């Protein structure tokens, strides 16, 4: 990435943009952590707070959009600077979606907390922990312009996908064994899918970091499960944020 420009104010503006992305990332990461805690602890207060906090991320994304448009109009950036601004727009969009998925998990938690818990709940915090680590590491990769760290996050998404597929099959078994489990298992399915989507957006950010630093996409192809199968589940699930 570029270092310094003749106009110091331009450098300050680019640093401010990076700080806005980092702040937004911290909020999104916290959204996911609070949502998982709300599920595990059956904490309605934490779930409600998570849902309400989503507005902060939405507002910050709007500020990033406006700031980037202003930079594009006034500075007419080229090469690395242009990638840096366009990349910030892409990353802010992914972070906003991560926060939305955290809010979706919290909404499901409110409903799940009203009924008897089911055994497969243990897998949710494991998936959530891995997704949170991916968010943290990809934000560190952004702050450090570290392509290797971004690539590591990109590869770890495979593990989240595999955990989701395994949980999906386990929950189907529970529902077939006892219809009384259907409601709780359905909520867990949507929660797991939202966490899986968090991992997907973390990999999007990793790809954007590679674009920012190297000027092009990763050379590797997309991942598959170890057995080559297609991931199954609620692939088109998009809940209202």
Image (cartoon, rainbow, N blue to C red):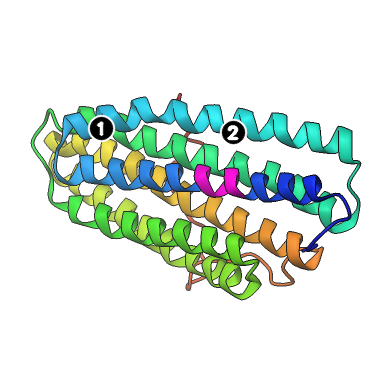
Report the span colored magenta: 19-24
Q: Is residue 194 visible?
A: yes
The mark found on residue 47 in the picture is 1
Q: Which quarter shows the C terminus?
A: top left
Q: How crowded is mark 1: few (under 14 residues within 10 Å), some or many (20 or more)?
A: many
Label 2 element class: helix
Label 1 element class: helix
| Number of marks in picture | 2
**Mark 1 and mark 2: span between their CA atoms?**
22 Å
Q: Mark 2 points at which residue?
A: 61
- Please tell me which residue is depicted at 15% across the width and 36% down the height of the picture: 43
- Is 142 left, or right, of 169 in this rendering? right
- Is 122 left, or right, of 70 in this rendering? left
Report the front residue among 35 and 230: 35
Report the front residue among 163 and 18: 18
- Please tell me which residue is depicted at 30% across the width and 55% down the height of the picture: 167
Q: Can residue 232 be seen in this view?
A: no
Front: mark 1 or 2: 2
Task: Specify the quadrant of the image occupied by residue 208.
Answer: bottom right
Q: Which quarter shows the N terminus?
A: bottom right
- Please tell me which residue is depicted at 65% across the width and 35% down the height of the picture: 64
Q: Is the magenta stretch mostly helix, strand or loop?
A: helix
């Amino acid at each position: 990435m570029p270092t310094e420009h003749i106009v110091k104010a331009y450098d300050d503006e680019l640093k401010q943009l990076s700080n806005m992305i980092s702040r937004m990332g911290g909020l999104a990461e916290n959204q996911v952590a609070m949502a998982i805690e709300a599920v595990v602890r059956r904490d309605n207060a934490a779930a409600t707070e998570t849902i309400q906090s989503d507005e902060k991320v939405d507002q910050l994304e709007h500020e990033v959009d406006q700031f980037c448009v202003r930079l594009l109009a006034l500075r007419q950036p080229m090469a690395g600077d242009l990638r840096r601004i366009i990349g910030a727009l892409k990353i802010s969009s992914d972070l906003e979606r991560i926060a939305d998925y955290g809010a979706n998990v919290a909404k499901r938690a409110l409903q799940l907390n009203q009924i008897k818990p089911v055994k497969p709940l243990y897998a949710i915090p494991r998936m959530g922990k891995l997704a949170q680590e991916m968010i943290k590491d990809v934000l560190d990769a952004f702050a450090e312009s570290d392509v290797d760290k971004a690539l590591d996050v990109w590869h770890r998404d495979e593990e989240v996908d595999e955990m989701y597929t395994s949980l999906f099959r386990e929950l189907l078994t529970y529902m077939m064994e006892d219809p009384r489990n259907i409601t709780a298992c359905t909520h867990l399915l949507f929660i797991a899918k939202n966490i899986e989507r968090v991992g997907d957006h973390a990999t999007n950010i990793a790809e954007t970091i590679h674009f920012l630093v190297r000027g092009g996409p990763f050379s590797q192809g997309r991942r598959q499960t170890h057995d080559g199968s297609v991931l199954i589940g609620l692939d088109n699930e998009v809940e209202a944020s």
